[in-house]
Image: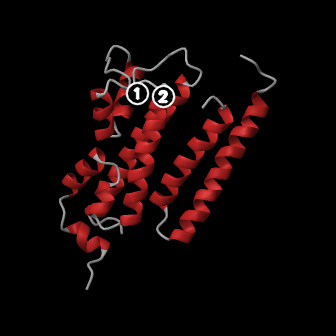
Amino acid sequence: MRATTIERAQGANPLLVWIAAWLVPGAGHLWSGQRLKGFVFLVMLPAMFAIGLALEGRLFPFELDQPLVALAAIADLGIGLPYFIARLLAAGGGDVIAVTYEYGNTFLIVAGLLNLLVAFDAFDVAAGRKG
Amino acid sequence: MRSHFGVLLIFAFCVSTIFAVLLRDDVREQVRFGARLFGAFVLGAYLLGWLMYPFPL
């Protein structure tokens, strides 16, 4: 008999599931057996991040003397592994005079925040609070 | 991509899809909720754009 989502998820440590879900968008739901959800997140969230980079968006630096920039940096980091890959490839420099600069920033920030939301949802599934 | 409306459509599609899949479990409900959310995004932005038209910055 196939294990239900909750039975599978309860075997996993919720914190590990959260970390996996943060690093690789959708990984937490795939781990819990929610394949369709996991696959959609795996495709859509990195796609949003890539579109943000293509629209000349900027990956903001952690400048604590500028609180809004620091908050944007935290939101950017929310996407997990794609953020580090973009940093390694020196992408996300942003072109402030590009007509799509602010759109790019919006895509990057929203992709990161949505991935954090998805990771907390995966945590709840793993903790048995949600089916 | 330089079309403001085109970027709006892509953004609305991505966010609607993710919220629909996250907040609904049944596939039919996901499609229905996602379509409504997408429509609300696009229509809301369109109406807001027209409302802001007489008030230039």
Rendered position, A30 above or below A62: below
Residue at the limit of the structure toward the bottom, as seen here: A1
Q: Residue furthest right?
A: B54
Comparing B3 with A30, the one in front is B3
Quadrant in the picture for the C terminus of chain A: bottom left
- The quarter of the picture where residue A123 lies is bottom left
Please tell me in which quadrant of the rendered image residue A47 appears.
top left
Q: Which residue is mark 2?
A: A105
Tell whether label 2 touches label 1 (CB within 8 Å): yes
Chain on which label 1 sits: A
Compared with B28, A103 (above or below) is above
Q: Give left or right: position of A109 versus B53.
A: left
Residue A117 horizontal side relative to residue B38, left or right: left
Residue A34 percent across, percent down from the top left: 35, 66
Query: How is the protein colored in the picture?
Result: secondary structure
Against A130, residue B41 (above or below) is above
* Mark count: 2
Q: CA distance from mark 1 to mark 2?
A: 9 Å
Q: Chain of mark 2?
A: A
Disc 1 target residue: A72
SS for callout 1: helix
Looking at the figure, which quarter contains the N terminus of chain A? bottom left
- What's the residue at 29%, 46% (across, down)? A22
The answer to whether residue A103 is left or right of residue B57 is left
* Mark 1 or mark 2: whose residue is earlier in sequence: 1
The amino acid sitting under disc 1 is Ala
What residue appears at the point 74 percent right and 32 percent down from the top-left corner?
B49
Quick one: A68 or A85, which is closer to the camera? A85
Q: Position of residue A63 (x, y in %)?
A: 32, 17
Residue B5 is left or right of residue A110, and the answer is: right
Q: Nearer the viewer, mark 1 or mark 2?
A: 2
Q: Residue at x 61, y 64 (%)?
A: B32
